[in-house]
Amino acid sequence: MSAPDELFCWEGDWGLPSVDPDCLVLLAYAKFAGAPLKVQKISNPWRSPSGSLPALRTSKGEVLSRTSDIIIHLRKQKYNADYDLSAREGADTLAFSSLLEERLLPALIHTFWMDSKNYVELTRRWYAEHLPFPLSLVLPGRMQAAQQARLRLARSDEALDGGEELEKELYHDAAECMNLLSQRLGTSKFFFGDSPSSLDAVVFGHLAPLLKAKLPNAKLQQQLQSLDNLTLFCSNILLLYFPGDGRENAGRKASSPAEGGDFDHVPNKRRKQLLSALTAVGAMLAYALFTGLLSVRHVHQRALEAAPGRTAADEEEEDED
């Protein structure tokens, strides 16, 4: 029997199996379709086979990193969450997925990555605390730049000027999108009845972080919280398909678990980061001394005890004698 496909994704927090929307989409889709994936929840993208998260390593060794490519691969393996959908429901899935990509996603990027208060107090802090040193110093900023480029592409706007006007426009579009999703869901458990589909995975993946994160600037979050059926939709999926993640995240905070997720178990993350930092500083000092960038001058004890009238030149002459 061949080994199962292996999914690498960002680890979870806030009662979620992952903090990353794309990872949440894939985790939910795999659950809905019954795909027997081996899940590796990590906080270091360099441990992923693609160098990014999410990523899937298939049983044949192929590596996929795009969410759409991973879902297509699972469907080819006969794990299809949309198998029972009608042609019309399939068309609705495409329409609402496109609407979410165009209207909701830009506002989510702005909320987590562009809003200065949310970025500094929540997003950057979370990644800085969970990434290993020295990635924790540089990767959050690079991730923010990548998300900003993603937002430019979504809006076809190189400058992203506008400040409050831009935020107002993004949040207006997102509110309209969530209202339409709420109307389509109605009182149903899932978007197409009693069984979840890929649309449910996509909606859950994007709404759950917005619902659960402790955002300092919670304008968009408050809009979601006002839509009771969407908040219940996210809560039901967490309860039915990820019942242990809330307790797992709480236990992780209490016990300061290993940084590498399923890869290794490091009992004292902060101590190891401090030792790494000290080692790096020591290596830099050694290099500076070796190359002559830094020199240490030894002064004879008598120079410290010399009379006020004596000069350094006199001391050096005595040392030569």
Image (cartoon, rainbow, N blue to C red):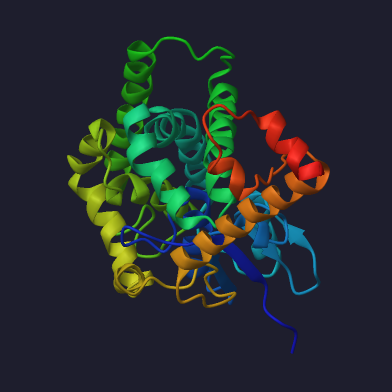
**Residue 81 in view of the camera:** no
- For the C terminus, which image quadrant? top right
In the image: residue 244, left or right of residue 72 = left
Along the viewing direction, whichever of 321 and 13 lies nearer the viewer: 321
Q: Dividing the image into 4 quarters, which one contains the N terminus?
A: bottom right
Residue 198 visible (yes or no): yes
131 to 120, vertically: above or below = below
Q: Is residue 54 left or right of residue 314?
A: left
Q: Nearer the viewer, residue 265 or 111?
A: 265
Q: Position of residue 54 (x, y in %)?
A: 60, 55
Q: Residue 187's spot in the image, x, y percent?
A: 22, 52
Picture coordinates of residue 266 (x, y %)? 51, 75
Residue 278 vertical placement versus 320 (above, below): below
Foreground of the two, 66 or 310 = 310
Q: What residue sits 40% from the left and 50% below the top?
A: 126
In the rendered image, the vertical position of residue 57 relative to residue 109, given as above or below: below
At x 49%, y 45%, the residue is 93
Q: Relative to 4, does residue 121 appear above or below in the rendering?
A: above
Q: Nearer the viewer, residue 132 or 319?
A: 319
